Image (cartoon, coloured by chain):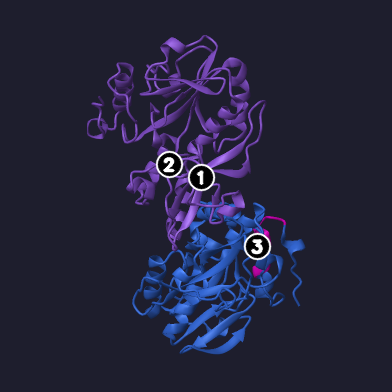
Chain colours: A blue, B purple
């Protein structure tokens, strides 16, 4: 049972983030990390065999808006010290998915038994970081108010291909009033390492989105007549691109079960 | 006749700006300063008697987006050293307008004969500075391409009143494609001293603008279906507010005849 709550982890020290990882490691935290260790960066996880990892790294480097890498392991190592000195990728997330040839083969809280000496771990920035910055400045986010998932859409914007990896950019959408949209562009521009500024505003059909009420991922969120839909590049992009490649082997985080790191969201502000 | 051309003043040294002022002073430049001394800040001029100046300064301080003051003189002094050491407000603009009780009483190239010991000069930042930054980054501006004036609109956004000064904000409008609008917000956010970020995007009716094809000042510019209208606070605001007060005496620059200063546009970038 999940014994870690925001109330007990909001002390604002890196110990709070480490406590989350330890709770995952000993099996006491198995649910979502949403709302845990506020102030600390949470990351998406993608683990690939070394023969694919080089191409994937190039893909992310060429597409920093949807695929902002915040940490990469050495080949075979489950450590990413830049995100937490004690961190163990095999045990420190509450939930994982294991894939073979594009098929889900296991959903588990510990991937030690699946570990291989040729694996490379990628930790990719997540919109929770910039959403915290928006909320801290009083910009309301409807999907947060309603406790649903942000709506996400496959677009007609192609990512730059690299090796076997290619595909369309996925974006998340948040409806905002015009003055809020201007402020949100300013605020998220400070966070290029976690998706940064929006990639589009106002004309969804221009990026291949036909119906805002039918997201490809997440939940629908209405756009009111006095609002503008604002679109950010989304960390689901690398997941969807990996799924297309159907790698012989891969590990990802389970939905909502992110890696909680020792890095503060504010560290990622460039100014 | 105007013997100063962009070709002869584009050397990029402050001497270019000073040459413009000297040409005004000796009467050889009497036309618009548009396109002259590229790279250097041009300012709007408002000169008021001291008894009104304190209120006007408070008004500008309370409304920095439409009324960004970049220089103020001492009472009775025609000097604003922070904008140019040799600068003489009485002679260094190509054209002035002189007002009594709100009526235009003279249009002249030299206001020395109108000068009084109780006058205070205000130099207010101008959109030419941020437009240069936009054009330098390859963002097209339709009114520039068409060599017409930017369209400007009185809005329903009230300025914060101060003493005798109050009234609505005037905005300028530039149509941009969505990705250009996002970039333009980033770029102009760097220039808070020359109007800064837009005050509105996308929904003109929300700020009291009924018909984009009928600007209150300047020339109409069409907004194409794939574009977003982007609105910036405009330096016409202080002029329209002063006109409402009908001060006993005032001097302003003639339209298009700005004060060319020794300050570089890039100096006003906060980052």
**Is the residue under label 1 in contact with that under label 2 (CB below 8 Å)?**
yes
Q: Which residue is mark 2?
A: B130
Identified at 66% across, 53% down, the residue is A136
Which stretch is magenta? A11-21
Q: Are marks 3 and 2 on the same chain?
A: no
What residue did someone put label 1 on?
A: B232
What residue lies at 59% left-to-right and 72% top-to-bottom?
Answer: A151
Query: Which label is found at residue B4?
Result: none
Q: Tell me the subunit letter for badge 3.
A: A
| Secondary element at tag 1 | strand
Q: Circle 2 sits in a helix, a strand or a loop, which is it?
A: helix
Q: Which numbered mark, 2 or 1, is in the foreground of this view?
A: 1
Specify which label sits upstream in the sequence, 2 or 1: 2
At which x and y percent is residue B89? 43, 18
Q: Which mark is residue A141?
A: 3
Residue at image location 41% in from the left, 77% down from the top = A167
**Cα distance between the residues tagged 3 and 2:** 31 Å
């Amino acid at each position: 049972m999940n014994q870690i709550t925001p109330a007990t982890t909001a002390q604002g020290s890196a110990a709070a983030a480490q406590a989350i990882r330890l709770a995952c490691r000993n099996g006491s935290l198995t649910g979502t990390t949403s709302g845990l260790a506020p102030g600390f960066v949470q990351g998406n996880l993608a683990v690939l065999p070394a023969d694919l990892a080089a191409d994937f790294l190039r893909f992310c480097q060429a597409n920093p808006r949807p695929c902002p890498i915040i940490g990469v392991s050495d080949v075979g190592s489950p450590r990413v010290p830049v995100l937490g000195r004690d961190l163990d990728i095999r045990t420190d997330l509450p939930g994982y998915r294991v894939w073979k040839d594009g098929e889900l083969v296991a959903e588990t809280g510990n991937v030690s038994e699946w570990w291989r000496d040729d694996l490379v771990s990628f930790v990719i920035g997540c919109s929770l970081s910039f959403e915290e910055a928006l909320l801290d400045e009083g910009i309301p986010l409807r999907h947060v108010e309603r406790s649903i998932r942000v709506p996400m859409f496959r677009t007609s914007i192609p990512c730059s291909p690299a090796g076997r990896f290619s595909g369309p950019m996925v974006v998340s959408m948040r409806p905002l009033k015009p003055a809020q949209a201007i402020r949100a562009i300013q605020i998220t521009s400070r966070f290029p390492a976690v998706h940064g500024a929006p990639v589009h505003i106002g004309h969804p059909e221009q990026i291949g989105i036909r119906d805002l009420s039918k997201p490809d991922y997440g939940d629908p969120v209405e756009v009111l007549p006095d609002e503008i839909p604002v679109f950010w590049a989304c960390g689901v992009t690398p997941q969807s691109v990996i799924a297309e490649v159907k790698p012989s082997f891969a590990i990802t985080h389970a939905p909502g079960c992110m890696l909680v790191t020792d890095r503060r969201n504010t560290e990622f502000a460039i100014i």
